[in-house]
Image (cartoon, grey):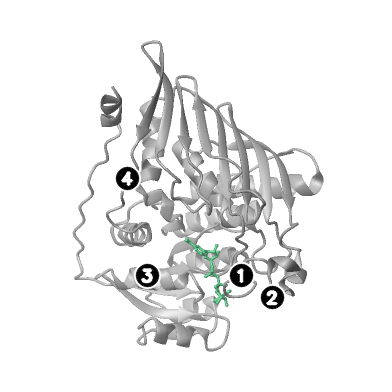
Amino acid sequence: MADNILDRFKTDTEEHVVDASKKVKVGIIGTGWIAEAHAACYKRCPDVEIVALADIVPGKAEKFAKDNGIEGARIYNSDRELIDNEKDIDAVSVCTYNRQHAPCTIYALENGVNVLLEKPMCVTTEEAVAICRAEKASGKVLSIGFQPRFDENMKMVKKVVESGELGQIYYIQTGGGRRKGIPTPYGTSFIEDETAGIGALADIGCYSLDMVLNAVGYPKPLTVSGYMSDFFGKNPATYPAHPEYAEKFSVDDFGAGFIRLEGGIILDFRIAWDMHLDTPGDTIIMGTKGSLRIPSTECWNGSIGGPLKIYHDVAGEKVETVIPEKENDVDNFDKKIRSFIDAVKYGLPAPVPSSQIIYNQAIIDGIVRSAREGKEVTVEIPEI
Ligand SMILES: NC(=O)c1ccc[n+]([C@@H]2O[C@H](COP(=O)([O-])OP(=O)(O)OC[C@H]3O[C@@H](n4cnc5c(N)ncnc54)[C@H](O)[C@@H]3O)[C@@H](O)[C@H]2O)c1
């Protein structure tokens, strides 16, 4: 019985032949931590040339070029300088901290450059709307950097929902987080309002939201009741080597939201960078015919914490169908970069479109607004 059910979720194998006769010229804006992953993946694409790097910290892009073996790239002191000077560049990766996502992306699109924008999309719904409008006016490709989208287990979550095996979805619980994990490996860009804008909610919360929203077809959020706190971030004991970070901490380390989605689905969400708990719960998707459990991971980053399990009735019996974990043949980050380059080269739709991720951003923004106002808020997204 279980085998027959599993047959319905088989994955197609993907084959890819790269035409390297014409190089796609790319630049990287913001040469910090995640830019290294972008550079490594671009270097593995035979049809990509990294022609330019920009960072506002003097010397940082030069050092990055050296450390990552891309000495041939031209170096700039800001995103604008790069875009203004690189007249025939095809695409940029925007790898800046969150507060600089919108200005850098909009400027690149306005100048006819395709953009791979790191997650979270930005900080506010207004910024997300401005990004989407710039994208629409430009006719260029904008993809948002959610590499878990390419994970075989994540694809399986979507396939299970789309198969109809769960029936009509009416309730989703998602989120997760870390017991100790406020990200300060290279300083304070994740924990200060002027660089990050939002904390755990956006940094790792956006992944949990994307997993379930993508699975159920990204319904529009209607209302949000939200909560945020910063008990751990504000505690000097959290940073034994840098107690002064507690003073600088000006975002959330925990956030929760109760969201009503179009189509009558309730989304119950919570995420933590730090907490006295291993996990605040697995992800569950409840439907009228069956429910799906996705075991939580400590650091919610798009991998699953164990095999997926479907709970349903078969011939009047309570049955649990375990879906074995799948291996990824190619790294998800490589797939994120490859799919973006293919979209640029062949005029394909954005692999992770802004038209979906604007709802992800609107939920995060709704939680922030609701937590500040102390009441439920409505989500309004103007026409793009
Ligand atoms: N997809 C993933 O797995 C993943 C992992 C880590 C981080 N991220 C995201 O990537 C982004 C960057 O994270 P990070 O850890 O690399 O941060 P970081 O602070 O290490 O690097 C950001 C860099 O951007 C530079 N910068 C800021 N504004 C700029 C501008 N206008 N022009 C040029 N450079 C500018 C900063 O000087 C800094 O060097 C964040 O939004 C984060 O959420 C994604």
Q: Earlier in the sequence, mark 2 or mark 1?
A: 1
Left or right side of 103 for 168: left
Q: In the rendered image, which residue does mark 2 sit on?
A: 242
Residue ID at (52%, 81%): 81
Q: Could you say which disc has been placed on residue 267 in the image? A: none
Q: Is residue 132 visible?
A: yes
Q: Are marks 2 and 1 in contact (CB under 8 Å)?
A: yes
Q: Position of residue 75 (x, y in %)?
A: 45, 85
Q: Are marks 4 and 2 in contact (CB under 8 Å)?
A: no
**Could you give the CA–CA distance between mark 2 and mark 1, rounded to whole angstroms?**
10 Å
Amino acid at dot 4: Lys
Circle 2 or circle 1, nearest the eye? 2
Badge 1 density bin: few <14, some 14–19, many ≥20, Cα 10 Å: few
Q: Position of residue 43 (x, y in %)?
A: 31, 73
Circle 4 or circle 3, nearest the eye? 4
**Could you give the CA–CA distance between mark 2 and mark 3, rounded to whole angstroms?**
41 Å
**Could you give the CA–CA distance between mark 4 and mark 1, rounded to whole angstroms?**
32 Å
Left or right side of 47 for 40: right
Q: Are marks 2 and 3 in contact (CB under 8 Å)?
A: no
Residue ID at (51%, 27%): 286
- Element under disc 2: loop
Q: In the rendered image, which residue does mark 4 sit on?
A: 326
